Image (tube, grey):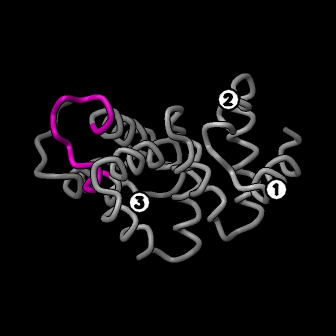
Amino acid sequence: MCVKVSGPGALCEHVVAGTQFDNIAAHATHRVIYSSLDIPPDTVAKWLVTMPQEIWDDHLGYVVKAWRCKNPDEAEQWLNSMSVDVRDQVTAKFSVALDWDNPQENFEAAFSIHDRALREETLKKISSDNREGINRLLKRAKLSPQQRVEFKRITGT
């Protein structure tokens, strides 16, 4: 069924079931990342974060990554306007949406997570998701000696 809506808010009002929300979130994320159309990542990020976390869990990191590429200052300002708990959750999702050419930003974000358990979980996920190329990734990330020690302690890498 096609529904004509005036924006993400109207779409939220129309769709009720969680799986439909997840499909819409996935579609919006795909449009931001892969479409030649200029879908503003800030609009999608701000909309996604209004959803329950289980909806934006798999998508928000990639949208924030796209936003940070287009307008890093604005994305950072938005992140800093959030409560620490929500910011940590969003930062964790961004951190694991790695940019292999420039992983420095992802690692810096992961190490900035205030919640120690979430920070460690995020670093473990980065390590486990990239097991085969982790050494190359770490070289590109240019971690400080302290960060290397912490990463090794947490991940065993």
- Which marked residue is nearer to the observer: mark 1 or mark 3? 1
Q: Residue at x 27, y 34 (%)?
A: 31
Mark 2 and mark 1: Cα distance apart in space: 18 Å
Query: Relative to 124, is 94 on the left or the right?
Result: left
Residue nearest the viewer, comparing 157 with 115: 157
SS class of the residue under badge 2?
helix
Is 43 one of the magenta-colored residues?
yes
Which mark is first along the chain, 3 or 1?
3
> Would you call the spot at circle 3 few (<14 residues within 10 Å), some (14-19), or many (20 or more)?
some
Mark 1 and mark 3: Cα distance apart in space: 30 Å
Query: Relative to 113, is 117 on the left or the right?
Result: right
Mark 2 and mark 3: Cα distance apart in space: 33 Å
SS class of the residue under badge 3?
loop
- Quadrant in the picture for residue 147: bottom right
The kind of residue tagged 1 is: Glu
Cβ atoms under marks 2 and 3 closer than 8 Å? no
Residue at mark 3: 49
The kind of residue tagged 2 is: Arg
Q: Residue at x 48, y 47 (%)?
A: 61
- Quadrant in the picture for residue 43: bottom left
Above or below 21: residue 85: below
The kind of residue tagged 3 is: Val
Residue at mark 1: 150
Which mark is first along the chain, 3 or 2?
3
Q: Quadrant of the N terminus?
A: top left
Which range of residues does the magenta coloring cover? 32-44
Residue at mark 2: 136
